[in-house]
Amino acid sequence: MIYLELKIVNIKDEPLLSRKLVSAYVEFEKSTPSYAEVASSLSSSLKTDEKLVAIKHVYNSFGAKKAEVIAYVYADEGKKQLIEPKPKEKKEKKAKEAKK
């Protein structure tokens, strides 16, 4: 388990898109935490489902043990599916499907 301390700085409500913009600082011990680790920490801190959290950026300074996090917390999963960009498929998967 990676030590991860999350401190929420600002929450801005965006009612038109049914989401909240969350700015936070993360302090950690070893390497910069992954987006999944930050999302789980943020969702437990805000008491929401992890599926509703979309991490946009993790800004880290070289050598520092803290990072700034910009994330969106959506009201429901349908809105998140509609607004968030779809993850791109890897080229290897497309090549395997083309061969079949």
Image: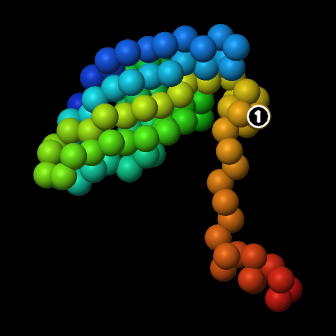
Q: Is residue 8 visible?
A: yes
SS assignment at label 1? helix
Please tell me whether residue 61 is drawn above or below residue 68 in the rendered image. below
Residue occupying image coordinates x 38% and y 50%: 34
Mark 1 nearby-residue class (10 Å; few <14, some 14–19, many ≥20): few
Q: Residue 1 location in percent, x, y?
A: 26, 47
Its colouring scheme is rainbow
Q: Amino acid at mark 1?
A: Leu
Q: Is residue 4 visible?
A: no
Quadrant in which the C terminus is drawn:
bottom right
Question: What is the quadrant of residue 69 in the picture?
Answer: top left
Please tell me whether residue 73 is drawn above or below residue 37 in the rendered image. above
Q: Residue 41 location in percent, x, y?
A: 37, 33
**37 left or right, relative to 89:** left
Residue occupying image coordinates x 70% and y 14%: 16
Q: Residue 44 location in percent, x, y?
A: 41, 26
**5 left or right, relative to 99:** left
Residue occupying image coordinates x 44% and y 14%: 11
Q: Residue 21 location in percent, x, y?
A: 50, 21
Residue nearest the viewer, comparing 20 with 97: 20
Question: What is the quadrant of residue 15 in the picture?
Answer: top right
Q: Which residue is mark 1?
A: 82
Residue nearest the viewer, comparing 33 with 18: 18
